[in-house]
Amino acid sequence: MTPLRIEDIALEWSPSAPIPPVPLASPVLPIGDSGQAYRTYAEAVGAIAAPSVFENRPTYQLLHADLAAAKPTMRFGLGCYFDSINVGEAAAHEFALRQRGQAIDAGVRAAVEDPCDPAQRPVNLAISTLTIRREPQTGAKSFLLHWRDPRKVGHAGGLYQVVPVGIFQPSGYAEWNIGHDFSLWRNMVREFSEELRGESEDHGSEQARIDYDSWNFAKHMEQARRDGALTAYCLGLGVDPLSFATDLLTAVIIDAPAFDSLFPVSATSNAEGRVLELQPFTEERVAEILARHPIQAAGRAALRLAITAITN
């Protein structure tokens, strides 16, 4: 797929569309203190080993996508974070146990015949962004990677990933955020602020909507985009075959002066792990990183797509 500009993707909202239910309880869920099996993966994790970031916040759930159409579109309804966690993470654990020789009758994984069909399971969309710094004079590029601390996250702990990454969701629980934050770009701006500047994810949106026009960082990001110093691309849409995690794969190329102004002191650690130093964005270095490091499926796909599709 030829990379699309993020602004060329039309978003559609279907608030009354039915969200696919979780197919069934997984047979691999552990027994709780009550003597009964936990009902869901999220319930088990919350009781046994809750990471520091593990909230059942509202999300924009993907209902349909056609990025190859003359007018690329994505349609969403309202869901919750645990909806897809309960399916995907349970399915991943079922697969792991089967690989170790344990027989599993039925289960979540067997119930989802096509993980790429949003009608068969709840699909929370993550926006996985490869951040690239570009020298205008030479065209030389470098990029950032993030290590996900398993003590802090409920998904893909211990793996490397592109950065920033975030679930497509409103900024808070208040109902006014649902329509106001329904924007791929605004979601990406918030994640850049949190993961590369170390700023809080609490923007006060439980008291009032975020004023993106007066927020200095958001204004400067938008100005860089308008000036041509920042370009945001969509590389494609992918589904992790293990956990069914679904990602919009994106790349943001920022000219060095704008990058250095936006991120004068990049955060080396954040609420989900740590950010590594800039790496050369060359075929050789990307191939070396992919071969030597455990990288989340979305990050691996984004790097492979970007190194072949982004040439200037």
Image: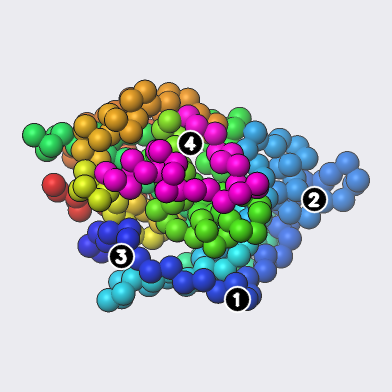
Q: Residue at x 32, y 61 (%)?
A: 7
Residue beneath label 4, please?
Answer: 194
Which residue is at the front of the view, 146 or 25?
146
Q: Identify the residue position indicated by label 3 in the image.
A: 8
Left or right side of 187 for 20: right
- Residue 152 lies left or right of residue 136; in this view the side is right
The span from disc 4 to disc 3 (Cα, nearest Å) is 25 Å
Q: Which structural element holds mark 3?
A: helix
Q: Which secondary structure is most common in the magenta stretch?
A: loop
Q: Earlier in the sequence, mark 2 or mark 4?
A: 2
Q: Earlier in the sequence, mark 1 or mark 3?
A: 3
Q: CA distance from mark 1 to mark 2?
A: 29 Å
Residue with the mark numbered 2: 38
* Magenta segment: 198-224
Work out whether mark 1 precedes mark 2 in sequence or the reverse, and give the earlier one.
Answer: 1
| In the foreground, 285 or 138 | 138
Location of the N terminus by quadrant is: bottom left
Assess whether mark 2 and mark 3 are in contact (beta carbons under 8 angstroms): no
Which type of secondary structure does the marked residue at label 2 adopt?
A: loop
How many other residues sit within 10 Å of disc 4, few (<14), some (14-19) or many (≥20)? many
Instruction: Give percent across and percent down for residue 271.
Output: 55, 31
**Label 1 to label 4: alpha-carbon separation:** 31 Å
* Mark 1 element type: loop
Q: Nearer the observer, disc 2 or disc 4?
A: 4
For mark 1, what is the residue?
A: 17
- Specify the amino acid type for callout 1: Ala
